[in-house]
């Protein structure tokens, strides 16, 4: 990429417009920075549903979107149920927490809400993909199609591949091959009076998750390793339903839908961490910084938190605090290590299954 007069200049370029990228954009705009969000603009018809913990309320309030998220149509998550390490259900109730209820999200709508908020905050948008990036005289020069972007800082929100962070010299460490095989069941496919809680149930091949969504729909996911999906043909509706019907509790929340509308989606859910997660003039955020097992239920919470925290670090660095980005990178490492410790304890508490999935996690 040859250096030339840029088509666009800004203080911060953000590659990726997901929750992390938009949280960073909103925060940086509040700090007064000029921001350009570069995103491919591809929006799927649906994303596997995710629960958003009550602790996210403080982050959503800072981003100015709490009222919009609370207004719906996201459904309240009143707690969690789990059959883990035993056949009976254990329950935790959010209503007695300091924050109150969480949410079962319509992910497409949630992402769109954050995109709209970034736009209203004054972030500029460019549809495309950062194809090349290099440092020129202390700034970033980025190629987006035929355009050249010049920015003082670059935030990588490209997802678990951390493509731009790796280009800057970082490495990505992955510790498993977990995937989700997910289905969106339409209205009428759920039994009546389904509790407004997430439900997790362990099984020989891994574990199952289900949660009610808006308009009576529900999401159901089988969590297992990529090679086990192929070995047991779990990517086919017939075998997916067979294993679902072998559960004790999850099957009680759904009615079989034939044919399975929308098919099955296989989504990467592996654990990874980027080292370092920041350097001179750049930082990785969201999944580009750290990803966690969905059992931790912290994916979107982490995306919002890293987007906000990295934006604050960029603002501090620009103001002369030379250790701000390094401190952010260290925080990513320590947070990820704490998560790994908690994950070992969680999987170690399930001793009923002598199968490849569980043995790998012991």
Image (cartoon, rainbow, N blue to C red):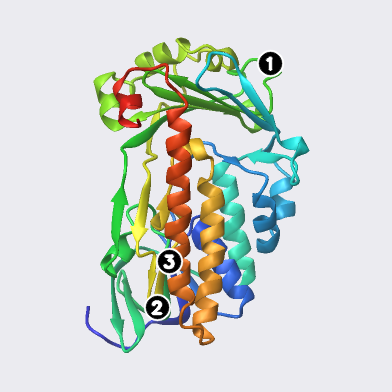
Q: Is residue 212 left or right of residue 338?
A: right
Say which label, 1 or 2, has the lower sequence index.
1
Task: Residue at the far left: name it.
Answer: 2
Which quadrant would the C terminus be assigned to in this image?
top left
Residue 60, image x and y in percent?
66, 56
> What is the quadrant of residue 161 in the picture?
bottom left
Say which label, 3 or 1, has the lower sequence index.
1
315 w.r.t. 207: above or below: below
Sort mark 3 into few (<14), some (14-19) or many (20+) by Cα contacts within 10 Å: many
Identify residue for label 3. 329
253 w.r.t. 73: above or below: above
Q: Judging from the image, what secondary structure is the residue with disc 1 in?
A: loop
Question: Closer to the observer: label 3 or label 1?
Answer: 3
Identify residue for label 2. 281
90 w.r.t. 2: above or below: above
Q: Judging from the image, what secondary structure is the residue with disc 2 in?
A: loop
Residue 286, image x and y in percent?
46, 56
Q: Is residue 302 left or right of residue 205?
A: right
- Give me the residue at 56% from left, 64% from top: 308
Q: Please tell me which residue lies in front, 193 or 248.
A: 248
Residue 276 visible? The answer is yes
Q: Is residue 217 left or right of residue 173?
A: right
Residue 289, image x and y in percent?
41, 58
Q: Please tell me which residue lies in front, 60 or 116.
A: 60
- Give me the residue at 64% from left, 67% from top: 120
The Cα atoms of the two marked residues, 2 and 3, are separated by 12 Å
Q: Please tell me which residue lies in front, 309 or 340.
A: 340
Q: Please tell me which residue lies in front, 356 or 56.
A: 356
How many marks are shown on the rendered structure? 3
Residue 339, image x and y in percent?
47, 46
The Cα atoms of the two marked residues, 1 and 2, are separated by 53 Å
Identify residue for label 1. 192
């Amino acid at each position: 990429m040859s250096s030339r007069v840029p088509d666009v200049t800004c203080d911060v370029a953000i590659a990726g417009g997901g929750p992390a990228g938009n949280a960073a954009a909103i925060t940086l705009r509040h700090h007064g920075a000029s921001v350009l969000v570069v995103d491919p603009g591809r929006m799927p018809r649906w994303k596997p549903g995710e629960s958003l913990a009550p602790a996210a309320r403080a982050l959503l309030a800072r981003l100015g979107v709490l009222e919009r998220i609370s207004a719906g149509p996201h459904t309240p998550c009143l707690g969690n149920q789990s059959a883990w390490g035993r056949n009976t259900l254990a329950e935790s109730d959010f209503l007695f927490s300091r924050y109150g209820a969480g949410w079962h999200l319509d992910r497409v709508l949630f992402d769109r809400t954050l995109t709209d908020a970034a736009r209203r905050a004054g972030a500029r948008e460019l549809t495309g993909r950062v194809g090349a990036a290099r440092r020129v005289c202390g700034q970033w020069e980025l190629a987006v199609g035929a355009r050249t972007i010049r920015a003082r800082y670059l935030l990588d929100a490209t997802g678990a591949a951390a493509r731009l962070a790796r280009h800057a010299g970082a490495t990505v460490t992955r510790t498993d091959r977990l995937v989700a095989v997910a289905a969106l069941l339409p209205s009428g496919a759920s039994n009546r009076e389904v509790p407004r809680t997430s439900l997790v149930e362990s099984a020989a091949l891994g574990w199952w998750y289900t949660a009610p969504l808006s308009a009576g729909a529900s999401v159901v996911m089988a969590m297992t390793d990529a090679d086990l999906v192929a070995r047991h043909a779990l990517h086919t509706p017939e075998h997916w339903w067979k294993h679902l019907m072998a559960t004790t509790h999850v099957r009680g929340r759904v009615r079989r839908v034939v044919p399975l509308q929308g098919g099955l989606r296989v989504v990467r859910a592996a654990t990874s961490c980027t080292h370092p997660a920041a350097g001179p003039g750049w930082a990785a955020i969201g999944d580009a910084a750290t990803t966690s097992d969905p059992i931790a239920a912290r994916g979107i919470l982490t995306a919002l938190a890293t987007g906000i925290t990295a934006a604050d670090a960029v603002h501090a660095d620009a103001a002369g605090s030379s250790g701000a980005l390094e401190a952010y990178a260290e925080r990513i490492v320590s947070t990820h290590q704490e998560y790994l410790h908690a994950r070992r304890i969680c999987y170690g508490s399930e001793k009923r299954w002598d199968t490849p999935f569980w043995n790998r996690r012991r």
